[in-house]
Each structure stands twice: as C-alpha cells, then as structure tokens.
Image (cartoon, grey):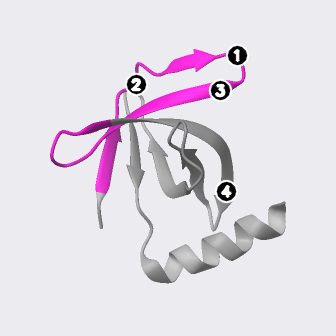
Amino acid sequence: MEEIVVNKENELDEELELVELIDEDGNSTMFIMEEMFEYNSKVYCVLVEPGEEEAVLMEMIESEDSMEFIAPSELVYDELVEYYQSLE
C-alpha cells in the first residue's frame, strides 16, 4: 500500500484547500482537496490535481503535526467509490 505524506503547511485559498503530496521517491505534486467524507470510521478525501479531470481517492490520517494520505486497497476502493457516488 502506497503511503504519501503531506506537508502541514498547506495553503488555504478562500474555497480551495491545496495540499502538497510527497511520494516515496520525494516527488511533490499539488492537489485540490475537493471533498472529505467518513466511511467505516475512517476519513477519506477526494483530491484533484489542478487542470486535471480525474480524481484520486485517499484515506486521510491527521495527527498533531502532519497528515498522511494512504491509497486504499483495491477491495476497499470499489466500496468507497460506490459509497461516494451514493452521496452525490
């Protein structure tokens, strides 16, 4: 399971929350956090890279000084997509 750590120094722009994700190789990518929702006592978020149409669905774990984003397993991912679509 891929784990991505985000810098806590996120920019907050009126309606858009921008987060910088840094992958295991040290590559940095900015995402817009479009939405957050809870499923089975865990918090998930929908992230979209600016200028892109496809979204990324990640589990969000927040601690006092950082946030971690973890890609859900394939089994859980399908359930999450179905649940998220039912919210719309």
Please name the residue that numbered disc 3 is placed on: 16
Q: Are marks 3 and 2 in contact (CB under 8 Å)?
A: no
Q: Residues within 10 Å of mark 3 (few under 14, many from 20)?
A: few
Q: Of label 4 and label 2, which has the lower sequence position? A: 2
Q: Residue 47 carries which label?
A: none
Q: Which of marks 4 and 1 is nearer the N terminus?
A: 1
Of labels 3 and 4, earlier in sequence is 3
Are the residues flagged by discs 3 and 1 in contact, CB closer than 8 Å? yes
Q: Do the residues labelled 4 and 2 touch (CB within 8 Å)?
A: no
Please give the label number shown on residue 14. 1
Position of residue 21 measured from the top left corner of the image (x, y, whole percent): 36, 38
**Residue 2 location, quadrant:** bottom left
Tag 2 secondary structure: loop
- Badge 4: how crowded within 10 Å, few (<14), some, or many (20+)? some
The label nearer to you, 2 versus 1, is 1
Q: What residue is rendered at 58% in x and 79% in y?
A: 78
For the record, the magenta segment spans 3-28
Q: Distance between the residues labelled 4 and 1?
A: 23 Å
In front of the other: label 4 or label 1? Answer: 1
Q: Which residue lies furthest to the front in this view?
A: 51
Q: Which residue lies furthest to the left in this view?
A: 25
Classify residue 64 by image quadrant: top left
Toward the viewer: 51 or 1? 51
Of the image marks 3 and 2, the number of the one nearer the N terminus? 2
> Would you name the residue on which mark 2 appears?
8
What number is the disc on residue 38? 4
Q: Residue at x 47, y 31 (%)?
A: 19
What is the spatial separation of the Cα atoms under label 3 and label 4, in whole angstroms?
Answer: 20 Å
